[in-house]
Amino acid sequence: VQLQASGGGLVQAGGSLRLSCAASGFSFDSFAIGWFRQAPGKEREAVSCISSSDGSTYYADSVKGRFTISRDNAQNAVYLQMNSLKPEDTAVYYCAMGSFVPCTRYGAGQQYYDYWGQGTQVTVSS
């Protein structure tokens, strides 16, 4: 089981990035996928989550209206479209997989995730 986050980079405030989370070694269409981030000196925090069964989603208040999570089970991938980026979005972003349903109830809880991928750095300059 392996998860790999990619798509990070350096972008100016107001810009956009799309992160990808790819899975290998298993089919993740039965699992919820979440995105978390950790900024320097801060705790890791939940960003977004998408359920497996009904596609329901969770977003942290700080990203609502700016970020959109989606999944393509045929490609074994989940995407996080990040628009209107702010300097405070700067962090290492991680994707994780969990066997819970739904995201609206459990998606923000790191303890519910079973596998974690390596992170991808997102830096937003002011």
Image (spheres, rainbow, N blue to C red):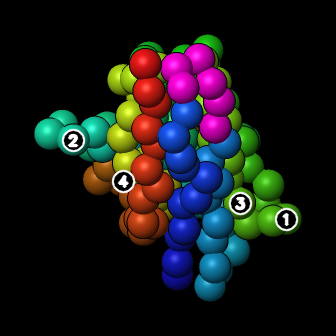
> Is residue 110 shown left or right of residue 9?
left
Dots 2 and 3: beta carbons under 8 Å?
Answer: no
Q: Reading the chain from its start, which is encountered first: label 2 or label 3? A: 2
Q: Position of residue 101 (x, y in %)?
A: 54, 47
Q: Nearer the viewer, mark 1 or mark 2?
A: 2
Q: Which mark is residue 74?
A: 1
Q: Residue at x 79, y 55 (%)?
A: 72
Q: How many numbered callouts?
A: 4
Q: Secondary structure at mark 3?
A: strand
Q: Hey, what amino acid is under mark 4? A: Tyr
Q: Marks 1 and 2, how far apart in space?
A: 35 Å
- Residue at the extreme bottom of the image, as rendered: 25
**Mark 4 sits on what residue?**
112
Q: Residue at x 54, y 68 (%)?
A: 4
**Residue 27 shows in the view:** yes
Q: Hey, what amino acid is under mark 2? A: Pro
Task: Find the magenta span and give its range.
Answer: 12-17
Q: Label 1 neighbourhood size at 10 Å, few (<14), some (14-19), many (20+)?
A: few
The correct choice, above or below, for 63 with respect to 96 in the image is above
Q: Secondary structure at mark 2?
A: loop
Q: Marks 2 and 4, how far apart in space?
A: 24 Å
**Mark 3 sits on what residue?**
77
Q: Reading the chain from its start, which is encountered first: label 1 or label 2? A: 2
Q: Position of residue 19 (x, y in %)?
A: 62, 48
Q: Position of residue 14 (x, y in %)?
A: 59, 17
Query: Does the segment drawn in magenta span residue 16?
Result: yes
Q: Quadrant of the C terminus?
A: top left
Dots 4 and 3: beta carbons under 8 Å?
Answer: no
Q: Label 2 neighbourhood size at 10 Å, few (<14), some (14-19), many (20+)?
A: few
Q: Reading the chain from its start, which is encountered first: label 2 or label 4? A: 2
The correct choice, above or below, for 94 with respect to 57 in the image is below
Q: Secondary structure at mark 1?
A: helix
